[in-house]
Image (cartoon, rainbow, N blue to C red):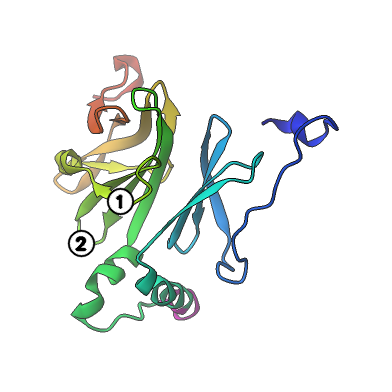
Amino acid sequence: MDIYTIRDPKATPLTSLAIDPHEYLVGFSIIGSCNGLLLLVAKHGSLVCIWNPSTGDQLEVRSHRSQEKLIYKAWMFRMRYGRSIFMNDKYEEQNAWWNCRRLYGFGYDSNKDDYKVVAIMHGNSEKIQAKIFSMSSSSTWRRIKNYDEFNHMVLYDFDGKFARGAVYWVGCIVDNGVKTSKWRLVAFDLGCEEFKEIAPPEHLNNS
């Protein structure tokens, strides 16, 4: 799909996203695309959707259904009053979800003929988590273990870009809690499902 599809009368008509607009009033962000599929993320974070705009097929990846209304109300409360709605440890996990930066990546695993979504969460508590969702399993998120090795880095607020079987983010090295000018690429191999750090060419880095 490209810009000419919109004007080509012979092209397959685009379809509408079959999601209740009243349930997600805050809208969606387009995170990335791969082979004609789009990755959409609700701005309040309770829904990730893989959508084929040509066929209308879509796969919704939700948070726990019992938490969805609570998550939406918490997002609206934070937007209106500027603070968390959660007041006790019972909802510590949900509170942590709202107090974190979330970066996503989307790509294709040619070895397994599968599309995968990667979510990286940086919390205020300095706890960093990375999870992966496989389109073929359509079940739940799985935690990526070796991302704990990257606690010495801070990723910039840009979602990942897919190329040649991996998703890439850009970050910088942190020294004693201070960001440095030394930047790195963080790559996630969708085949072996592992992260690795890539140093840039010397003339592009102040190392």
How far from the left and from the top, in percent, is residue 146?
A: 16, 39
How far from the left and from the top, in percent, is residue 199?
A: 26, 22
Which quadrant of the figure contains the N terminus? top right
- 184 sits left or right of 31 in the view: left
Dividing the picture into quadrants, the one containing residue 10 is top right
- 76 sits left or right of 168 in the view: right
- Which residue in the structure is indicated by mark 1? 141
Crowd band around label 2 with a 10 angstrom C-alpha radius: few (<14), some (14–19), many (20+): few
Marker disc for residue 50: none
Q: Residue at x 37, y 31 (%)?
A: 168
How far from the left and from the top, in percent, is residue 155?
A: 32, 42
Residue 80 drawn in magenta: yes
Q: Residue at x 35, y 66 (%)?
A: 64
Q: Earlier in the sequence, mark 2 or mark 1?
A: 2
Q: Residue at x 40, y 40 (%)?
A: 105
Name the chief secondary structure element in magenta: helix
Q: Residue reaching furthest bottom?
A: 87
In the rendered structure, which segment of residues is drawn in magenta?
A: 77-82
- Which residue in the structure is indicated by mark 2? 125
Q: Residue at x 35, y 77 (%)?
A: 84
Taking the image as drawn, is residue 160 in sight? Answer: no
